[in-house]
Image (cartoon, rainbow, N blue to C red):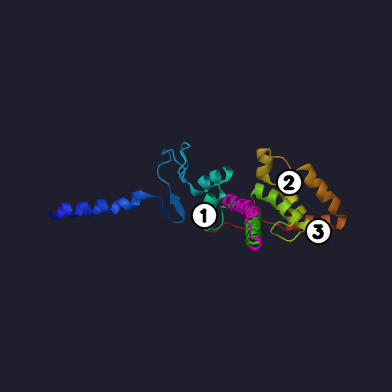
């Protein structure tokens, strides 16, 4: 075989593995063209985004957290600025903990899930701030802390994105629970925590 033909055959063989499946590049998975009409789990449900976070969020909404979690972990490892993925990861872990038969593993999943939701809330994501209210009221993955719950309720109430989108405030039953628990003193403490809160700066 001539040298040129040998080189061409080698290049084609080298390209085959790259075409065989998703490639990880800088923490992002490339699932091919957006119009290939197939989701990462093999279901043919129309076009999907090339963005890992968007694909994972779709999987979470479909109840496929077992497939979404590995992808979301890739996204949150990028650092600051991925609050939606942090929130989705937290929600998935909390959902999966409900079906985990091992009590210790379920507790670990709840703790990690709460941690990611609070981190997203701390980054200013409105849905995470609303979720954090219930986390601290119920003690899901965190220590019960009504003052911290009220802090997040106040921050969600004044969240600029929530107001711009016209999203509803926290549910009346949640407000009632807070009203039952909080005193004037603890409300003042919650307001002080909310006033002192500032979202972290994004990594440069």
Mark 2 or mark 1: name the one nearer the start of the chain: 1
Q: Earlier in the sequence, mark 3 or mark 2?
A: 2
Q: Which residue is mark 2?
A: 157
- Left or right of 4: which side holds 30? right
Q: Which residue is mark 3?
A: 189
Task: Pinpoint residue 78: horizontal percent, then vertical percent.
Answer: 51, 57
| Residue 147 placement: quadrant | bottom right
Q: Locate residue 198: give its quadrant.
A: bottom right
- Residue projecting furthest to the bottom: 104
Tell which circle, 3 or 1, labels the residue nearer the N-terminal end: 1
Q: Nearer the viewer, residue 148 or 194?
A: 148
Q: Which mark is residue 70?
A: 1
Q: Which callout, 2 or 1, points to the residue nearer the camera? A: 1
- The nearer-to-camera label among 3 and 1 is 1
Can residue 123 be seen in this snapshot? no
| Magenta region | 84-104
């Amino acid at each position: 075989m001539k040298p040129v033909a040998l080189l061409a055959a080698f290049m084609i063989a080298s390209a085959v593995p790259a075409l065989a499946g998703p490639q990880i590049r800088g923490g992002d998975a490339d699932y091919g063209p957006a119009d290939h009409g197939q989701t990462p789990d093999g279901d043919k449900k129309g076009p999907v985004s090339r963005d890992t976070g968007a694909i994972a969020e779709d999987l979470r909404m479909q109840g496929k957290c077992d497939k979404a979690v590995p992808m979301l972990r890739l996204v949150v490892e990028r650092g600051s600025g991925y609050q939606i993925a942090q929130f989705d990861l937290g929600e998935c872990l909390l959902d999966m903990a409900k079906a985990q038969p091992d009590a210790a593993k379920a507790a670990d999943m709840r703790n990690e899930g709460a941690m990611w939701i609070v981190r997203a809330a701390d980054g200013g994501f409105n849905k995470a701030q609303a979720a954090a209210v219930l986390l601290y009221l119920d003690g899901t993955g965190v220590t019960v802390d009504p003052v911290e719950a009220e802090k997040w309720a106040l921050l969600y109430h004044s969240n600029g994105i929530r107001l711009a989108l016209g999203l509803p405030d926290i549910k009346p039953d949640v407000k009632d629970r807070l009203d039952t628990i909080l005193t004037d003193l603890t409300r003042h403490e919650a307001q002080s925590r909310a006033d002192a809160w500032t979202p972290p700066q994004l990594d440069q």
